[in-house]
């Protein structure tokens, strides 16, 4: 049959079907975009059930793939049309219940004619070809620049499965999947199940996978390519680890397998439900948008986060263990039991963050994981929850386009902190029982927040309605401060005073915390007593402390049970500022350091005084987590110093020079401690501004200088070369060209690009900016590299050259580029220069562009607030 005859037959069949059908409701309430609203998704899931996908893919390694999707499902009625998601595909064959028809397809979804559907079981077959994605979504294709080998991996969250196959792309339409893949013979194919058989056919191999358990579309996955494989069958479940062949030497499989086995043992016991899948695969992939993704039994991890050119430091190993545990927790909470809609995504991530940290602390050598959580994750949550752009933990999600609008530190770390507080409030045993009951009741189903809260409340025999309202539906972080008075060395009055985040966020919460009392000794700060207290409202009197010795320091969130910012009372503030070296408890020391930094950001402690405190106390700090925490605050300090007005620039230069010299001294005296030495050396590079320091970096690269104990691996070399280029050192371009020739890897290419775009060249920067603003064939991972490095903080005047261009084009880019692009663009390229004029310009842009997406609006609010904070901090400087 020729093509013209086929087309005529198809058209006639569609017309006849339409003529013979009875009147029905409008065919679709969708807006023509690839996104589906919560309402439309709910209407679809009310009609569709018992879904099964039979998937067949042909992969060649080229820029496109071909596939057949057979969708089998029950339909409750044929009163109106049904949509099936498939994004940007070229359909070659389409049939409904065996009848070949021409698809009603708008390049985003297919509208199924209700006249061809039946009440009961239906089958839709779609054959199509599609280009591979290059932005990290759908079925992403990557060509290794080292050996030209092609690697594929899928990423579907929140709703990108439709970029790989025809699907009802929403979490509450769980389905089973049967998969067949034809691929080059040397490739491996990985999915939720282990293959049941493979068959060679010339230069190709066909892989067959048995039916999977019920999974939401975003939990299913398929990865393919000539991946190198490691295996470990020593435990209860078979483990595999995969990575590109060119990066094999950067992988330490024993670390991966050790933490994975420890986690599976811990979670099996904690949840009381065996791991729900038959094998556990982990795949290191390039160009990844996030840190990792919990695809059922085939978890993907970002190479950029977990591949190193030298032995991992303890901090890097802890991060690896923590992320493995986080994604593993999702296998139960997220994959086994799944949210109904994307407003539940926060609970997935918060729970995995809480359980991942708990497992890391209790099942691995990183027993101090909660201290790391406080110093890093929790501070990000406090920062974001103090912004004008803050939002409740639980928020409505209108469409799949908005699913990631609120995926941030509030979603992950504030939510995890709220669960940690709830764990203390209910008791660990009741909390665990509630979690077990929830997972058992809703296995392989979808559930909602209320289902989870009810399960916890029932286990603890406690009504959690008020708790849920205060913590999950109200935004903002509270502050507490101890208030006490003493006579004759004894406490006569003691209360906790709680304050709201702001007038517009007035909620005061109930929390269960510990109050720690301390007195100064000659060589240490003595811990007198810890008193558990449940407080609420604006003032809570703590009469049980009356009569105790008058303290020199009170910390009202001792051991970090609560999610609350601590304002030190005047006595405690003075003690903390002058006696950090006397605090032996590392968590308390960490929390006091944070209180001092918070005082800088709220304007009650000058930046000068904080830097002075750092220069006096930090050189003697021996705890790696605390050193990392304070160096992180110094990184923020450097940005403030870089953007200071001319009147403060003399002090800024002196402060940066002092930190530069302190860092180099610490590098040189820590030759016996590799992890410490590398941490301080990274800080030295970041603060290297003087000609002596830049020349020293050049000499180290050239082997004309050396530092005992320090090995310059590829990661450090690129860090140094990038820094020399930022400051246009005379040898910078020589090193860039040389290293680019020596390191042709993907990470090397991105490092070279980062160094090149950071150079202080106004014309080149404008060209780079124009390139990413326009359509480009540059992979998105490299576009992100450009955005991250285009305007370093010290290049204030160069940033000003294109500030107007970035402001005037923001609304159009927001409209054209989509949320994945704009998350990076808005974060890095909204202009900030610590000036009142820029605050005014950003406010004008905000008030005149109400049509901006929620994510970009939020980034704009945060930029305005950051500018205002910078102005406050610099105004408090003592010159």
Image: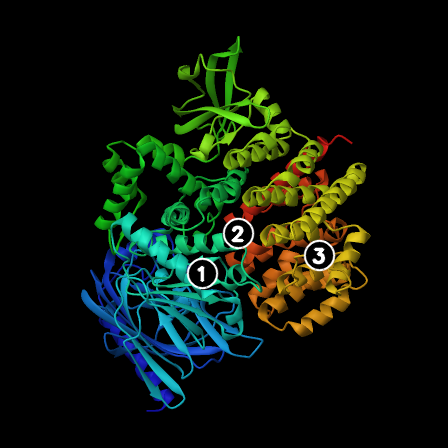
Q: Nearer the viewer, residue 866 or 492?
A: 492
Please give left or right for residue 536 compared with residue 310 in the image: left
Residue position marked by numbered label 3 in the rendering: 707
Residue 570, image x and y in percent? 59, 21
Which disc is residue 255 wearing?
Answer: 1
Among the 4 quarters of the image, the one containing residue 113? bottom left
Position of the N terminus, as image quadrant, is: bottom left
Residue position marked by numbered label 2 in the rendering: 315
**Residue under the point 41% across and 49% down:** 360
Among the 4 quarters of the image, the one containing residue 874? top right
Instruction: Tell me how many marks there are.
Output: 3
Residue 257, image x and y in percent? 40, 62
Name, please, the residue furthest toward the left: 120
Q: Nearer the viewer, residue 336 or 803?
A: 336
Mark with earlier residue (2, 1):
1
Question: Is residue 430 positioned above or below 61 on the image?
Answer: above
Mark 2 element type: helix
Mark 3 element type: loop
Q: Nearer the viewer, residue 305 or 18?
A: 305
Mark with earlier residue (3, 1):
1
Graded by Cα atoms within 10 Å as few (under 14), some (14 to 19) or many (20 or more), the crowding at tag 3 reads few
Residue 580, image x and y in percent? 60, 31
Residue 578, image x and y in percent? 64, 27
3 and 1 marks in contact (CB < 8 Å)? no
Q: CA distance from mark 2 to mark 1?
A: 13 Å
């Amino acid at each position: 049959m020729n093509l013209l005859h086929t087309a005529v037959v198809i058209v006639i069949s569609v017309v006849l079907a339409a003529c013979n059908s009875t009147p029905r409701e409008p065919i679709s309430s969708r807006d023509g975009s690839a996104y589906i609203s919560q309402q439309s998704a709910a209407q679809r899931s009310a009609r569709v059930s018992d879904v099964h996908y039979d998937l067949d893919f042909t992969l060649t390694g080229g820029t496109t793939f071909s596939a057949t999707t057979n969708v089998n499902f029950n339909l409750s009625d044929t009163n109106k049309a049904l949509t099936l998601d498939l994004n940007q595909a070229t359909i070659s064959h389409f049939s409904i219940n065996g009848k070949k028809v021409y698809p009603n397809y708008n390049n985003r979804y297919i509208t199924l004619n209700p006249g061809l559907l039946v009440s009961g079981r239906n089958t839709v077959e779609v054959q199509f070809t599609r280009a591979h994605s290059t932005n990290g979504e759908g079925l992403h294709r990557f060509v290794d620049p080292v050996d030209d080998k092609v690697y594929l991996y899928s990423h579907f969250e929140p709703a990108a499965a439709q970029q790989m196959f025809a699907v009802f792309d929403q979490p509450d339409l769980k389905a089973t999947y049967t998969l067949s893949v034809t691929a080059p013979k040397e490739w491996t194919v990985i999915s939720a199940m282990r293959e049941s058989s493979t068959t060679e056919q010339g230069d190709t191999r066909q892989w067959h996978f048995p039916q999977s358990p019920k999974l939401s579309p975003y939990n299913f996955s398929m990865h393919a390519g000539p991946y190198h494989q490691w295996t470990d069958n020593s435990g209860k479940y078979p483990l595999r680890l995969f990575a590109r062949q060119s990066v094999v030497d950067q992988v330490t499989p024993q670390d991966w397998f050790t933490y994975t086995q420890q986690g599976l043992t811990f979670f099996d016991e904690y949840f009381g439900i065996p791991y729900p899948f038959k094998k556990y695969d982990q795949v290191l992939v390039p160009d990844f948008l996030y840190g990792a993704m919990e695809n059922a039994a085939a978890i993907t991890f970002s190479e950029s986060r977990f591949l190193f050119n030298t032995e991992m430091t303890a901090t890097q190993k802890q991060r690896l263990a923590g992320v493995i545990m986080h994604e593993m927790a999702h296998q139960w909470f997220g994959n086994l039991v799944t949210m109904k809609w994307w407003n539940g995504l926060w609970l997935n991530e918060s729970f995995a963050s809480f359980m991942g940290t708990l497992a890391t602390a209790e099942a691995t050598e990183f027993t101090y994981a909660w201290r790391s959580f406080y110093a890093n994750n929790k501070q990000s949550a406090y920062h974001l929850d103090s912004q004008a752009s803050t939002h409740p933990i639980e928020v409505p999600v209108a469409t799949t386009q908005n699913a990631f609008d609120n995926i941030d530190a509030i979603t992950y770390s504030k939510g995890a902190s709220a669960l940690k507080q709830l764990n203390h409030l209910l008791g660990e045993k009741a909390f665990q029982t509630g979690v077990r009951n929830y997972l058992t009741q809703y296995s392989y189903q979808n559930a909602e927040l209320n289902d989870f809260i009810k399960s916890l409340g029932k286990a603890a025999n406690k009504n959690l309605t008020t708790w849920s309202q205060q913590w999950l539906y109200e935004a903002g972080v509270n502050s507490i401060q101890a208030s006490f008075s003493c006579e004759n060395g004894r406490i006569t009055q003691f209360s906790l005073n709680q304050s709201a985040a702001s007038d517009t966020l007035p909620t005061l919460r109930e929390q269960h915390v510990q109050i720690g009392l301390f007195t100064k000794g000659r060589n240490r700060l003595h811990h007198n007593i810890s008193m558990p207290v449940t407080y609420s409202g604006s003032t809570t009197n703590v009469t049980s402390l009356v009569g105790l010795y008058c303290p020199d320091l009170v910390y009202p969130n001792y051991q970090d049970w609560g999610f609350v910012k601590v304002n030190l009372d005047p006595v405690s503030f003075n003690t903390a500022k002058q006696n950090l070296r006397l605090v032996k408890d590392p968590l308390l020391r960490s929390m006091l350091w944070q209180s001092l930094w918070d005082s800088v950001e709220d304007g009650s402690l000058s930046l000068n005084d904080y830097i002075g405190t750092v220069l006096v106390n930090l050189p003697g700090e021996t705890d790696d987590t605390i050193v990392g925490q304070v160096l992180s605050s110094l990184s923020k300090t450097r940005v403030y110093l870089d953007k200071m007005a001319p009147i403060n620039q003399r002090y800024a230069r002196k402060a940066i020079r002092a930190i530069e010299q302190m860092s180099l001294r610490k590098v040189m005296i820590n030759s016996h401690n590799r992890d410490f030495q590398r941490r301080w050396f990274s800080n030295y590079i970041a603060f290297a501004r003087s000609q002596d320091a830049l020349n020293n970096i050049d000499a180290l690269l050239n082997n004309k200088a050396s530092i005992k104990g320090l090995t310059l691996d590829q990661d450090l070399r690129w860090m140094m070369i990038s820094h020399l280029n930022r400051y246009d050192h005379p040898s910078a371009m020589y090193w860039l060209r040389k290293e680019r020739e020596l390191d042709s890897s993907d990470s090397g290419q991105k490092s070279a690009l980062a160094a090149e775009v950071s150079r202080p060249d106004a014309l080149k920067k404008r060209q780079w900016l124009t390139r990413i603003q326009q359509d480009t064939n540059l992979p998105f991972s490299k576009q992100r590299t450009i955005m991250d490095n285009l305007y370093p903080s010290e290049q204030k005047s160069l940033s000003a050259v294109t500030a107007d261009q970035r402001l005037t084009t923001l609304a159009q880019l927001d409209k054209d580029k989509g949320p994945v692009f704009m998350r990076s663009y808005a974060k890095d390229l909204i202009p900030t220069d610590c000036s009142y004029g820029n605050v005014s310009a950003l406010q004008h842009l905000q008030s005149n562009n109400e049509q901006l997406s929620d994510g970009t609006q939020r980034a704009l609010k945060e930029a305005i607030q950051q500018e205002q904070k910078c102005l406050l901090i610099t105004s408090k400087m003592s010159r």
